[in-house]
Image (spheres, rainbow, N blue to C red):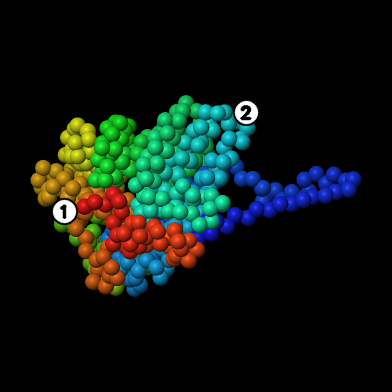
Amino acid sequence: MKKILFLLITASIVLTSCDKDFGDLNVDKKKPSEVAPGALFTTAQKNMVDLMTNSNVNRNIFRLISQYWTECTYIDESNYDLNTRQIPQNNWNIIYVNVLKNLNEAQSLIPSQSDAFYPPAVKANQNSCAEIMNVYAYAMLVNMFGDIPYSEALDFSKPAPKYDDASTIYNDLLTRLDNAISAIDEGAGGFGSSDLIYGGDMAGWKKFGKSLEARLAMIIADHDSGKASSIISKVAGDIITSNDDNTYFHYLSGPPNTNQTWVDLVQSGRKDFVAANTLVDVMNGLNDPRVPYYFTVDDAGGYTGGIYGSANNYATFSKPGDRLIAPDFEAILFDAAEGNFLLAEAVERGYITGDAGAYYSAAIQASCDYWNADATAYLATPAVAYATAAGDWKQKIGTQKWLALYNRGFEAWTEWRRFDYPVLTPGSEALSEIPVRYTYPTQEQTLNATNYAAAAAAIGGDVVETKLFWDRN
């Protein structure tokens, strides 16, 4: 893949002069030769969040795969056509080039900053922030594809990098994450205003880092229960369990830094998506109070979803809710609902002591509070209450977590693969089973053919039905 298609332009300018000093006349101040690490960090953050927030069918179809939305006229992506629009390749390139490469460059420049303006503690904090974002991005790649280039990625001397074993990568990511968290000095600054998530608040980064550590640990729970237990028991008391601590990326009300869903659906005037019947039917059946916030009313004044995977009339069905498509609607990287669901699961797995039902209820309450919905009657509904809801703990937590992760399609897809709940079925025109991974980019098959072939064989075949190492059910 010619080092994952990095297009890095390096210019060498040799200036000669006779006896005159032209000063900075030949310096283009609008094109600096070196970019500050804070600017690179900002760019990486925004590129990562934009990818996960947008609804462009060339990049992010996770709301479709998770069956929150379905399409109207063009239904290819709802039926798992990943390659016509090169969706896996687009995700691969954005994360490697626009996110990880920027983070890598930022980290390489942090030490060279003046100690007078950036004391060692600040530099260490900046590196920790970049490391946490590195872990976030690499974990996404592993959870999309399985084995990926890692140890040889971002290395110009390795134009055709090998693929590393996904479980080995995960173990290293957890080590890197733990080291990054341990290096944080909450009394010192970070990236300041260049940090679009926490504004340099290192206490926030530490809590987010531990929450991410809990997420990754629980993802591997069926693969390495001992490691998962050790991590969860260490961080359980420090993860995000209150909406006051949610990890947000705040968009602005005017372009170009607006909510990407607004860009896709409002600014562009597109009418591509309606609610999927899969989600709306479940929510209606439970009298879920979040329905009016997730979706608009349909043409009959109620809430209905289009048939998943089929062509649907845009005017007939409910659409994404008004708050969701507001230009300044924030993106969530981790929230209290997710944190409490992780703790409920940890109790059920025997990793921590406590009341799984209490954490489960707290998770639902946090989700409803976030959407300004009243959870009182909902939590008392026998089909929702932990003691009486159908199924075992995986069905109870899996179903309610799927409902709470609305608008976070990637995390919803990951959790559905872990829990296997709710039970989802492909549409009648689906090209495959519901994907449990993305196929490798087409460019890899031509530009990194040998390593691609080895990776495809190692994971059991480069098809969407091949389960990842942590998907053991």
Residue to which mark 1 is pinned? 286
Q: Amino acid at mark 2?
A: Ala
**Amino acid type for the residue under numbered disc 1:** Leu
Could you say which disc has been placed on residue 116 in the image? Answer: 2
Q: Tell me the quarter of the picture where residue 87 sits.
A: bottom left
Horizontal relation, residue 37 to residue 282: left or right: right
Q: Residue at x 74, y 52 (%)?
A: 13
Height in image: 428 above or below 52? below
Q: Is residue 231 visible?
A: yes
Nearer-N-terminus badge (2/1): 2
Instruction: Determine the residue positioned at 68% across, 53% down.
Output: 11
> Residue lying farthest top?
187
Q: Which of these two is toward me, 325 or 401?
A: 401
- Which of the two residues, 335 or 253, is positioned nearer the viewer here? 335
Asked if the residue under mark 1 is in contact with the one under mark 2, i.e. CB atoms within 8 Å, the reply is no
Residue 362 falls in which quadrant of the image? Answer: top left
Helix, strand or loop under label 1: loop
Query: Residue 165: x percent and y percent?
Result: 37, 50
**What residue is at 29 percent from the left and 73 percent from the top?**
311
Work out whether residue 458 or residue 279 is closer to the camera in this orientation and state it. Answer: 458
Q: Residue 346: image x %, image y %?
A: 23, 38
Residue 323: where, in percent of width, then height? Answer: 35, 53
Q: Residues within 10 Å of mark 1 (few under 14, many from 20)?
A: some
Query: Does residue 359 lie above or below 69 as drawn?
Result: above
- Residue drawn 48% across the image and 66% down it: 446
Q: Determine whether the residue tagged by mark 2 lies in a helix, strand or loop.
A: loop
Q: CA distance from mark 2 to mark 1?
A: 59 Å
| Left or right relative to 66: residue 173 | right
- On the image, the x and y values in percent for residue 8 come to 59, 54
Tag in front: 2 or 1: 2
Q: Is residue 169 left or right of residue 7?
A: left
Q: In this view, which residue lies farthest toward the right?
A: 19
